Amino acid sequence: MNDMDDLATHPVHRQEGVTLWRQIAERIQSEIASGATQPGTKLPTEADLSARFGVNRHTVRRALEELSRDGLVRVEQGRGSFVAEDVLDYNVEARTRFSEWIRKHNKEPSGIVRQLREITADRRVADGLGIRAGSRVVLLERLGLADDRPVSLARHYFPAARLKGIFQALQATSRITDALRAIGVEDYLRLQTRVTARLPTQTEADLLRMARNRPVLVAENINVDRDGTVIEFAFSCYPTPRVQIVFEP
């Protein structure tokens, strides 16, 4: 028998003095804690849970919202509710590379390029790159995936005049390390990382498949070459249900 099907044989009770949605949340939480429902498993639909517990969908939705706030359930827009996976530690180091980070967690890295174009730098980007506002920069926006699960949404900015050929190199490969090596930058280091937290925009929530009431971590990064020259300024958003940023000396 499916473990979630067993919930149907244990209906919630209106006489117990505990709200129905909390009883449902505790029942699902118990299934998760026991290991009967594995991380990443898709939960039954609201309609199915409503039928099993003998309650309306609003009550089920309230229970799932509570589990989501507690980090036990991940709600993906348009896809349903899933048992939350283990949170990935993102260790900020001198040489922080996306693919290496994901593979450390025994997952397969991949990415989707959302845009690659040359634009003029606004004040914030210009200050990050140490160039004049209005200068030309190359923007690469990419959605990073771990086993096809979104874990980052990043905007990378490169100074076009300082890095001749970077646009063409990124057209050939979206792997930043390979693109930089192709134009002669053999290595680069993290100079600075500043982290803040905020609620995601609707677009960010949709792309990262997360609820809008859960925050994202935003890392503002500056990378330099071996000579200490700034070659990249980036903003990366990480979904807190799946990623935590770790600083170690």
Image (tube, grey):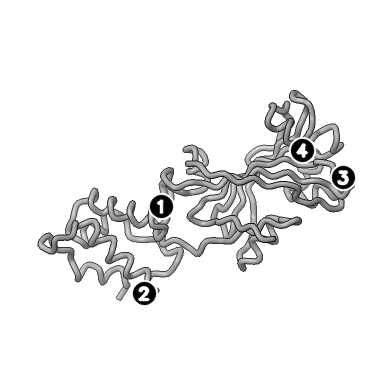
* Residue identifier under label 4: 158
What residue is rendered at 64% in x and 61% in y?
Answer: 102
- Name the residue rendered at 64%, 45% in the picture: 194
Residue 120 position within the rendered picture, expressed as x and y whole percent measured from the top left: 73, 26
Q: Which residue is mark 1?
A: 75
Helix, strand or loop for disc 3: loop
Residue 43 appears at what percent x and percent y? 36, 61
Q: Which residue is identified by label 2?
A: 34
Question: 245 or 157: nearer the eye?
Answer: 245
Q: Nearer the viewer, mark 2 or mark 3?
A: 2
Whether residue 234 is visible: yes
- Residue 99: quarter of image: bottom right
x 75%, y 56%: residue: 94
Q: Position of residue 152 (x, y in %)?
A: 59, 49
| Residue shown at 18% from the left, 63% from the top | 12
Residue closest to the far top: 134
Q: CA distance from mark 2 to mark 3?
A: 53 Å
Q: Could you tell me which secondary element the residue under label 2 belongs to?
A: loop
Decide which of tag 1 and tag 2 comes sooner along the chain: 2
* Label 1 neighbour load within 10 Å: few <14, some 14-19, many 20+: many
- Residue 154 in percent (x, y) is at 63, 44
- Cα distance in 3D space between marks 1 and 2: 21 Å
Residue at image mark 3: 183
